[in-house]
């Protein structure tokens, strides 16, 4: 949700803090701030809105100091304003915080009763005030943090800077990620390895309930009062990976990376020599699986919906797909011998994490498909199938989604083989179709100008847009509508083609574009009927289909795109790229903020 950075440096740290915040801005961008020690005293600069505002502020009022912390915020408690921007500080301590302190009201009541005055509307301030109260009672920062950790409830990560202490920074985590970076006489602490990448590649990850004391020459980590060791690992992230390259937006760069990252992911899950799928060893037998429950949020949940079609068709397995925020509170009965699959780019979405915890309480085997192997969801799982998408910075998920689909399809094929519902010949055919995907995605990307044209001529001026699909194209329609609304702020809905006549057909007139996702698959005739129903009512049809589909319906559409021919099983992966491009170019035509759409954040670590 929010991005955190802390640095003990040798030279002034403000430029480095800002540099790290730029890499973290994708996590939240409604306000930002930095704090350093100047002559032993905490000094801060904060600004509402995007990081550029903070940068301008710092230009006008520079902030010296060789130790400091920084934060970029996505508001939860207290509206986005300078007053509520982090670092939140007293005269003794400054705090940057990600997540939620659930018992903040109870703690605040106690602190107010002690006579403490609160200056912000944030839950974070209770941490600052609690630490201050301990420090004023002569505790050391270490004692104060140890004691505070025992009193805080919720899921959070925080970093603290203490007045008069040029030598230490402290960090603590419960639920939200926090990584410690080791430099040469300098130390770093931040939300993830991405924030630290240009500073150092030597990184260790704090675990839940850890709190750490950083000094210029290293870190000491505690759980409660016990010292613990966390291994230092080499992070593979380079600064090149996290730049925009020649692209105007991270999203466009990430759309264009798809042939490569789909290829990388295929390489880990397929054996081209034997034309078979090879998954890592699984702690369960597909033959004994009673039911698969797939959970996730947003785009990740749509990946699960597509996978449901694959598991049912290829492995004849019963699959339930549940939005994580509903699953965790509905508490559905899950049968013995079930597998719960969590799908998440970040691996830290709190609803998905909690849904997985619920599945664990129901004795399900936990499998996760995640892009961040060190994440909380990965750690909780019995087995992890990583997507090899690399860092995804654009808030709207693109390459993470298509690589999730690749992994889930490989898993469905493996399940089908193990259960005897998929023949060896069929497996070979599907593996070949998967191997061709990077090339087909490339062909789609080569037609970018066609998408730009449709976006500018048909979609950008619309007030409402419908997306229709059937079978595994239905979740692609949902994903297309989600992408369009989050990027361009145009109201868009995805519908199963057959449901259109039960409601949305009432919306159709000559101003409503209807994007029809229609690869020629076994139910093409059905979506063709839905297409005709829209046409009969004067709807503006945008057809996404292959050669045969365009030959049949193209002349009746306002506009159409001829997609490369692919096996219908892999079509959802290819057609997703098409709806991504439509959304991107529509947003570009409208001039919205593509990488950081209003009100959204990349990873949602609060409810
Ligand atoms: C946010 C993002 C979405 C993403 C969802 C789930 O809402 O804006 O793009 O699909 O979270 O995130 P996850 O990291 O769990 O995939």
Image (spheres, grey):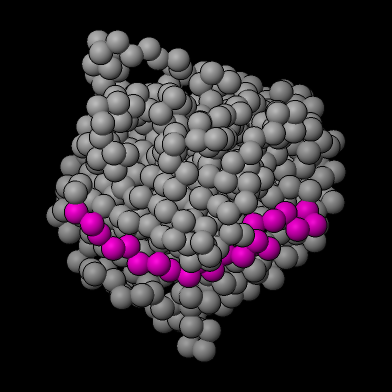
- 127 left or right of 44 in image: left
Instruction: Name above or below for residue 233 compared with residue 178.
Output: below
Quarter-of-image position of residue 242: bottom right
Which quadrant holds the C terminus? top left
Residue at 52% in and 58% down = 186
Q: In the displayed image of the protein, which residue is found farthest to the bottom?
A: 273
- Considering only vertical position in the picture, is 555 above or below 589? below
State yes or no: residue 231 in magenta.
yes
Please provide percent x and percent y for residue 407.
Answer: 46, 64
- Magenta stretch, residue numbers: 226-247
As drawn, the residue found furthest toward the front would be: 39
Q: How many labels, in total?
A: 0
User: Where on the picture, by quarter, is residue 541?
Assistant: top right
Residue 67 at what x, y percent from top left? 53, 44
Q: Which sits in the foreground, 418 or 534?
A: 418
Residue 513: x and y, percent?
Answer: 72, 32
Residue 78 visible here = yes
For residue 186, above or below residue 209: below
């Amino acid at each position: 949700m929010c991005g955190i950075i802390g640095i003990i440096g040798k030279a002034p740290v403000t430029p480095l803090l800002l540099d790290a915040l730029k890499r973290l801005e994708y996590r939240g961008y409604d306000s930002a701030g930095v704090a350093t020690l100047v002559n032993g005293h905490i000094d801060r600069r904060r600004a509402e809105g995007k990081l550029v505002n903070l940068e301008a502020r710092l230009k006008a009022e520079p902030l010296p100091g060789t130790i400091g912390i920084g934060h970029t915020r996505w508001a939860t408690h207290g509206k986005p304003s300078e007053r509520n921007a982090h670092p939140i500080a007293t005269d003794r301590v400054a705090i940057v915080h990600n997540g939620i302190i659930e018992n903040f009201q109870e703690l605040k009541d106690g602190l107010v009763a002690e006579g403490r005055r609160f200056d912000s509307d944030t839950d974070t301030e209770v941490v600052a005030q609690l630490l201050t109260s301990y420090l004023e009672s002569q505790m050391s920062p270490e004692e104060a943090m140890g004691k505070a950790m025992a009193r805080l409830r919720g899921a959070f990560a925080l970093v603290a800077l203490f007045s008069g202490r040029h030598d230490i920074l402290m960090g603590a985590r419960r639920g939200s990620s926090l990584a410690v970076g080791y430099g040469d006489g300098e130390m770093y602490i931040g939300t993830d390895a991405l924030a630290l990448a240009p500073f150092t590649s030597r990184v260790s990850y704090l675990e839940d309930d850890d709190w750490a004391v950083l000094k210029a020459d290293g870190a000491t980590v505690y759980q409660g009062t016990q010292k613990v060791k966390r291994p230092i690992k080499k992070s593979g992230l380079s600064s090149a990976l996290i730049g925009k390259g020649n692209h105007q937006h991270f999203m466009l760069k990430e759309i264009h990376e798809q042939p490569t990252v789909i290829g990388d992911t295929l390489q880990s899950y397929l054996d081209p020599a034997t034309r078979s799928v090879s998954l890592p060893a699984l702690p369960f037998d597909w033959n004994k699986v009673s039911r698969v429950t797939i959970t996730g949020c947003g785009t990740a949940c749509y990946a699960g919906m597509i996978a449901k079609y694959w598991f049912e068709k290829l492995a004849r397995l019963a699959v339930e797909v549940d939005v994580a925020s509903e699953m965790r509170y509905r508490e559905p009965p899950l049968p013995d011998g079930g597998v719960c699959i969590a799908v998440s780019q970040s691996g830290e979405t709190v609803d998905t994490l909690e849904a997985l915890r619920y599945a664990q309480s129901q004795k399900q085997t936990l499998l996760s498909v995640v892009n961040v192997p060190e994440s909380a969801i990965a750690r909780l799982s019995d087995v992890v199938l990583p997507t090899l998408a690399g860092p995804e910075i654009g808030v709207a998920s693109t390459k993470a989604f298509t690589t999730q689909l690749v992994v889930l399809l490989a898993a469905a094929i493996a399940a089908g083989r193990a259960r005897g519902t998929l023949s060896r010949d069929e497996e070979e055919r599907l593996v070949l179709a998967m191997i061709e995907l990077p090339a087909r995605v490339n062909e789609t990307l080569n037609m970018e100008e066609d998408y730009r044209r449709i976006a500018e001529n048909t979609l950008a001026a619309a007030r409402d847009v419908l997306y229709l699909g059937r079978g595994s194209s239905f979740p692609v329609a949902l994903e297309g509508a989600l992408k369009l609304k989050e990027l361009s702020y145009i109201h868009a809905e995805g519908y199963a083609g057959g449901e259109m006549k039960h409601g949305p057909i009432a919306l159709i007139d000559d101003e409503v574009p209807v994007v029809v996702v229609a690869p020629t698959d076994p139910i093409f005739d059905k979506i063709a009927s839905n297409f005709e129903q829209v046409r009969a009512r004067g709807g503006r049809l945008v057809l996404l289909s292959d050669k045969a589909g365009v030959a049949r319906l193209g002349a009746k559409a306002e506009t159409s795109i001829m997609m490369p021919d692919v096996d219908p099983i892999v079509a959802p992966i290819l057609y997703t790229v098409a709806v991504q491009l439509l959304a991107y170019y529509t947003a570009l035509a409208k001039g919205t903020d593509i990488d950081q759409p209003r009100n959204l954040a990349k990873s949602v670590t609060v409810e």
